[in-house]
Image (tube, rainbow, N blue to C red):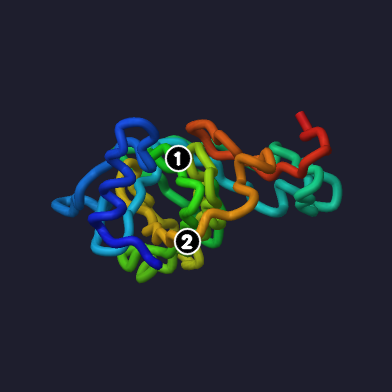
Amino acid sequence: MILNDRKIRKLCLNPFVPMITPFSEAVSAGVISYGLSSFGYDIRVSDKMTVFTDMRLISERVGGGTLDPKAFDPRVCMDISPTDGYFVLPSHSFALAHSVEHFNIPPNVMVLAVGKSTYARCSLAVTITPLEPEWSGHLTIEMFNQSPFPMKVYANEGICQLLFWQGEYPDITYADKGGKYQNQPAEPVLPIVSGLAPIP
């Protein structure tokens, strides 16, 4: 079943392995809201972001301008920093960031992400793959500015909402199978394919 605010709070305030750190009750005054909601939790985007460069530049840097998830070349990305508390995401551009929050997902919980109305109405698409049972780390956040205009994305404010489902314990968790994105650091993590060495 989907978890409500009471159950999410209880998991987050677990003194041994808190599900979300830092944990916040609902915060909305003067910011894009974040924290606990009735049936979810709105996470914040941190102050680190990497933006995919223009495809013409990608073509110059990487032969043919083709992105390969099995041999991802980090030269196609450029780190940007916030100014006055926000990033400027260029029109029709894609960026990776990470959550302020660190997660320790319980072994019988699955988490899905959905966008926030405020950004969705400005045409920002936020995509996050599921947080599997016993996954841990800072969450990498994928964002695409679908609009013809540059867009402000506010650091340390809400970016998307997580929904939590609790079920029976699975036979194998993400930690059991040694998932490649386990224990993600506080920075955007680029594509990884198990068994292949990344391009330096």
The residue located at (76%, 50%) in the rendering is 69
Q: Position of residue 44 (x, y in %)?
A: 35, 46
The quarter of the rendered structure image containing the N terminus is: bottom left
Q: Name the secondary structure under disc 1.
A: strand
31 horizontally vs 179: left or right = left
Q: Residues within 10 Å of mark 1 (few under 14, many from 20)?
A: many
Q: Name the secondary structure under disc 2.
A: loop
Tally of numbered tags: 2
Which residue ends up furthest to the right in the rendered image? 63
Disc 1 designates what residue? Answer: 104
Q: Is residue 130 above or below residue 199?
A: below
The residue located at (32%, 55%) in the rendering is 41
Q: Pick whichever, 127 or 125, lies toward us.
A: 127
CB within 8 Å, label 2 to label 1:
no
Which residue ends up furthest to the bottom in the rendered image? 121
Disc 2 designates what residue? Answer: 167
82 horizontally vs 197: left or right = left
The image quarter containing residue 74 is top right
Q: Pick whichever, 34 or 120, lies toward us.
A: 34
Q: Position of residue 33 (x, y in %)?
A: 25, 54
